[in-house]
Amino acid sequence: MIPDLFLLAVRNVLRRRLRSWLTVIGILIGTAAVVALISVGQGLERSVMVQVRRVAGYNTLLISPRGGLGGRFQVDIEAVRQLPGVMQIMPVRTEMAYVEGPVRRGIMPLVGYTAAMETFLVDLDVGRVAGRDLEARKEAVLGSRTARAFGAEPGSTVMIEDSSFEVVGVLAAAEGHTGLAGMAGIPISDGIFILYEDLRELFPGPNLVQYVMIRLVPGSDVVMVREDVRRTLVETGTTGAQMTSFADITEGISSILAGVQAFLAGIAGISLLVGGVGVMNTMYTAVLERTREVGVAKAVGAKRRHIMWMFLFESGLMGVVGGGLGLLAGFGLAWGAVGLAGRAFDFQGVFAPVFTVELVLGALLFSFVVGAASGVLPALRASRLPPADALRHE
């Protein structure tokens, strides 16, 4: 009986093709919007997690100012370096310096380079387009945009705060990668690297840093080392600083992105509910049009549940068809939105939409439930029609 009712529902939907397609489009638009927003949000979250993991890693601690990365604080680098479990420590200090190059002069960000920074730059996939690494005092490595703007290349000389520096290399961030982590929010392509000792000589006074990254020995107890670092900071008089781990960073990012995704999906879900109202309207119209048909079915022995199942199959079928087409439309919409945004804001390849099995099955199931639920009241009304009154209906 159930297969027969399902086939009858399919025939009834196909018989009213225009009305059925208009109803399906309502479900399609809502499903496409939800799928596109969720997939783009998940892709962005995955990209952020990958970038943070590449820069930091699970065995990395970050010491930063309490007011955010825009502030500065003083820290005893050597005291922290001597702690057991600490493999590398990278203080990040930047200053805005007056720079004169072969073809241009101006104020540019200056970054103090340490040996530990090389490891982090490798993790960021930053290579050299020309020259070599820093090896001695009074040498500088320029970001690609800085070198291009100042007309400098390996062998050139630049004046930084009235001190002469030889350009020994030019860095280039990987395509589609801004390289923000190692330079206190300054894109690698826009910076000038000099040795940390040179930076302190150019800008004497308290050794104030933007933040410090600590990479731990593999297999070490992160909680224990974190507590040792915290105690050392207190003992050496470091104030105004806070310490976070990779887990703290990813948890915070995930919660923020999840909240944004839920908000956007909720807004898109409204259109899906509007599509459900369209299904309900279509099914009520179908009940009115087929009142006499319901009377005939009951007269030949059809039960209430049979009538109800027939109309529920119809509404659920329109819901799942709209959901399936909306799923495909959502895929295309997500890829199109990411592609257009990438070209508009120059970040092609940074992230891609993520389509999981859960998202696909969830979209289909939810659209079916919305369609079926929208047909419940019309189906109940049809099942309760008295056979005699239904047969007399014109």
Image (cartoon, helix red, strand yellow):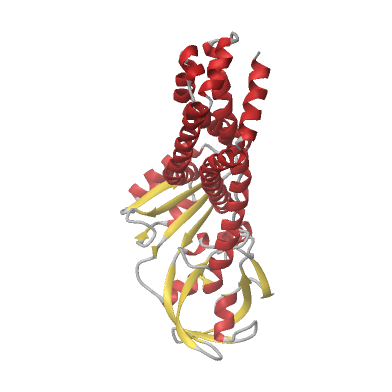
Q: Residue furthest bottom?
A: 103
Is residue 162 or residue 171 the one in the foreground? Answer: 171
Q: Which residue is found at the position 48% from the left and 46% from the top?
A: 83
Which quadrant of the figure has residue 211? Answer: bottom left
Left or right: 232, with 388 as reference point? left
Q: Is residue 20 above or below residue 157?
A: above
Is residue 213 or residue 382 the one in the foreground? Answer: 382
Q: Is residue 131 visible?
A: no
Q: Is residue 292 above or below residue 185?
A: above
Q: Which residue is found at the position 47% from the left and 43% from the top?
A: 254
The spot of residue 166 in percent (x, y) is 58, 83
The spot of residue 188 in percent (x, y) is 55, 68
Left or right: 58, with 239 as reference point? right
The spot of residue 243 in percent (x, y) is 40, 47
Q: Is residue 168 visible?
A: yes
Q: Is residue 297 above or below residue 273?
A: above
Is residue 181 or residue 138 the one in the foreground? Answer: 181
Q: Residue furthest top?
A: 301
Quarter of the image that includes the N terminus? top right
Is residue 240 or residue 135 the one in the foreground? Answer: 240
Q: Which residue is found at the position 66% from the left and 71% from the top?
A: 128
The spot of residue 271 in percent (x, y) is 46, 43
Q: Which residue is found at the position 50% from the left and 30% from the top?
A: 283
